[in-house]
Amino acid sequence: MSNKINHGKFRVGDVLKLKEGITNNHIKEGDPILNSRGKVRKIYGSTIHLELDAISLQELPEELIQTYMDEGWSVYVQAILEEFLEYAHPRMPDEAAIRAQDDLIERVDTKNGVSKHRIEYNKWVRHFELSERFEALTSAEKTFTNPALANFYDYMKNHERKVPANWTPNSVKNILTKWAPRKLVGNERTFESFHNIILAFFDFLNEKSYRDTSKWLTIVVESREAMIAAAQKKDRWTSAKRERMEAMEAGVDMDDEMEIWSFSMGKTLRGFDELTNELRDYHEGIEPEETPVKVDKRQFKNIWQNQKITVQYPDGTIKEDVKFKEVKNDLYEGLCELIKK
């Protein structure tokens, strides 16, 4: 990571630490957590959800951990205001720190009713993010790793009805070619990253003997092009994905849940306004304005001005062998349709 010092907005995946002298309702002066650092997991407006690293959790005294658990506060994921944080360098923990992290998280999650399957899977993800396979990913892929693997698990659980112990090559294929294209928000590059992350993760699971993923790896490699192609089929998107894709195309920060919510609410309110206006116009006898026809002008890219073409108008009129320049304006305005060129 570069030596940047808190310029601009933090992103999911950034490693942060608390600034010196910071206290709030949860964090008191002298609290060991003041020396902690971790990765940004979620962002809600100006609130950062920071997942503490293994060394930070190893250094937490038992009485503090118990206090957090008794009060119902999160131990290993802290919700902290953005203004209290600054960039930090990641720390590589030793095996003792990793074991301490695993033990603490398992204890807290068990108390909070998290399933054994999810606890195990989350441990796989944490260990993967400390591996050479993870380090070989690009910076963007590293940032996307945690949400990508969380989505993969959720798609398996909710749509294939399978926990990790029951995953099959067929269920892996369904996630990649069916559920991810329908639900995962992103462009072609997003799906390329998703593919690379799953491939690296399965390689890691195989190497560590967590699971035999040899058959899954073959499926991942073979499904790459099919997944990317399926993700382009907008008619198969869920309504939630369609709305988030609109937000992304409008320039909304997809790491900021508050910004996404504001976009969604704005769209809903605009919809109410349009409906209200339509009802008012109906009762007042005002004809609604026609919606302009959207024309894909790329279809005219290689037609020269004097090239003869054939067009058809909505009333059925066909003009054959007419010069492009003579009907260009009608074509651009959607008043007629190109039939032959």
Image: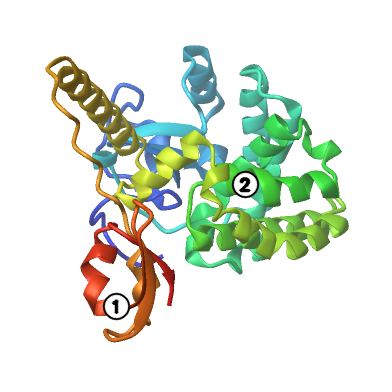
Three-letter amino acid code of the residue under disc 2: Ala
What quarter of the picture does the C terminus occupy? bottom left
- Is residue 295 among what the camera can see? yes
Three-letter amino acid code of the residue under disc 1: Phe
In the image shown, does 66 or 179 lie closer to the viewer? Answer: 179
The x, y position of residue 134, in whole percent, is 62, 61
202 relative to 246, above or below: below
In the image shown, does 107 or 321 lie closer to the viewer? Answer: 321
56 relative to 286, above or below: below
In the image shown, does 109 or 101 lie closer to the viewer? Answer: 109
Q: Earlier in the sequence, mark 1 or mark 2?
A: 2
The residue carrying pointer 1 sits among few (fewer than 14), some (14 to 19) or many (20 or more) residues within 10 Å by Cα, namely many
Q: Residue, x 49% and y 47% (percent of image)?
A: 185
Give the colouring mode of the picture.
Answer: rainbow
- Is residue 149 among what the camera can see? no
- Mark 2 falls on what kind of element? helix
* Quadrant hosting residue 118: top right
Describe residue 158's horizontal placement relative to residue 252 as left or right: right
The mark found on residue 324 in the picture is 1
The x, y position of residue 161, in whole percent, is 76, 30
92 relative to 78, above or below: below
Q: Residue, x 37% and y 82% (percent of image)?
A: 302
Question: Do labels 1 and 2 touch, CB within 8 Å?
Answer: no
The x, y position of residue 231, in whole percent, is 57, 53
In the image shown, does 329 or 244 lie closer to the viewer? Answer: 329
Describe residue 21's horizontal placement relative to residue 247 as left or right: left
Describe residue 1's horizontal placement relative to residue 138 as left or right: left
Q: Mark 2 — residue? A: 180
Q: Residue, x 47% and y 35% (percent of image)?
A: 240
